[in-house]
Amino acid sequence: MAYFKLLLIRHGQSQGNVEGRMEGWSSTALTLLGKQQSFRLGQRLRAEGWHPTQIYCSPLQRAMATLEGMLKGFEGSPEGSPEGAALQTSGLTSRANLPIPIRYLDDLKEYNQGIFNGLTWTEAHDRYPHFCHSLEHSLDWLPIPQAETLADGERRSQRFVDELLDRHRNGDRVWVISHHWILQQMIARLMGVRSRLGTAHGQYRCV
């Protein structure tokens, strides 16, 4: 059996977290605190010698900004240096002096909340009062219009985990930067348990 080291990282605090938004697939930036969290995580990983051989990242803005901050901290760049576009390689090199690749995968996006993407509950209630009233008072699961199903979200997280296990071997050290809900599904898949794990959303960051 092959073994490799895997680090699952939830993006830093986002503006949507602070505003209480259902971010989903919406594009939101990190707060100053979120940028600091990302940078300092990179510094910590460098201090601990946690050098990656492969990086996977969600293509949503808050995840890519987290990765960029981590790399700056890992490389020793000044905190708060200008942000750039999506990186194709990390800027780091392996022990063989080869660039460490980054893959941006849609499977690592947060749960797609459909018409609720990017809204606060108050905004959702203003736009969709009858549907929100039904959600508040029904004991049944009501599908959100234009959202992916829970089963679809679970399947893409499982697909990613299965690909990881198939691709990586002894000595590999993998960073994965993603989002709260999808990370829950990945952890459940790795542990071989039901995916209905519960953690308070927004209460852990850069783990």
Image (tube, rainbow, N blue to C red):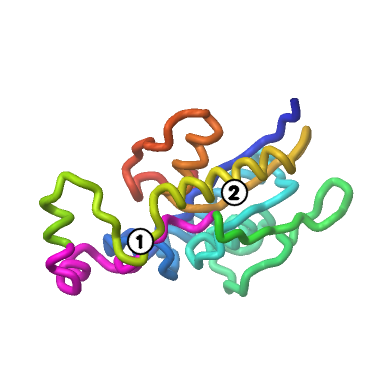
Q: Residue at x 45, y 56 (%)?
A: 110
Q: Which numbered disc, 1 or 2, marks the residue that appears first in the sequence? A: 1
Say what amino acid the circle numbered 2 marks: Val
Residue furthest out toward the right: 96
In the rendered view, would you say 57 is above or below 28? above
- The image quarter containing residue 7 is top right
Q: Residue at x 88, y 48 (%)?
A: 96
**As drawn, 203 above or below 114:** above
Q: Nearer the viewer, mark 1 or mark 2?
A: 1
Judge left or right: residue 140 versus residue 72. left
For the point 31% across and 61% down, the residue is: 22
Residue 68 magenta-highlighted: no
Q: Which disc, if any, is residue 113?
A: 1
Locate residue 30 relative to residue 65 in the image: left or right: left
Which type of secondary structure does the marked residue at label 1 adopt?
loop
Task: Indicate which disc residue 175 carries.
Answer: none
Nearer to the camera, 89 or 110: 110
Element carrying mark 2? strand
Q: Name the residue type under label 1.
A: Gln
- Residue at image coords 74%, 40%: 168
Residue furthest to the top in view is 1
> How many other residues sit within 10 Å of disc 2, few (<14), some (14-19) or many (≥20)?
many
State how many labels appear: 2
Q: Which residues are magenta?
A: 108-131
The location of residue 160, given as percent across then percent down, is 60, 47
Percent position of residue 177, x then y: 56, 52
Residue for badge 2: 176
Q: Is residue 122 magenta?
A: yes
Q: CA distance from mark 1 to mark 2?
A: 22 Å
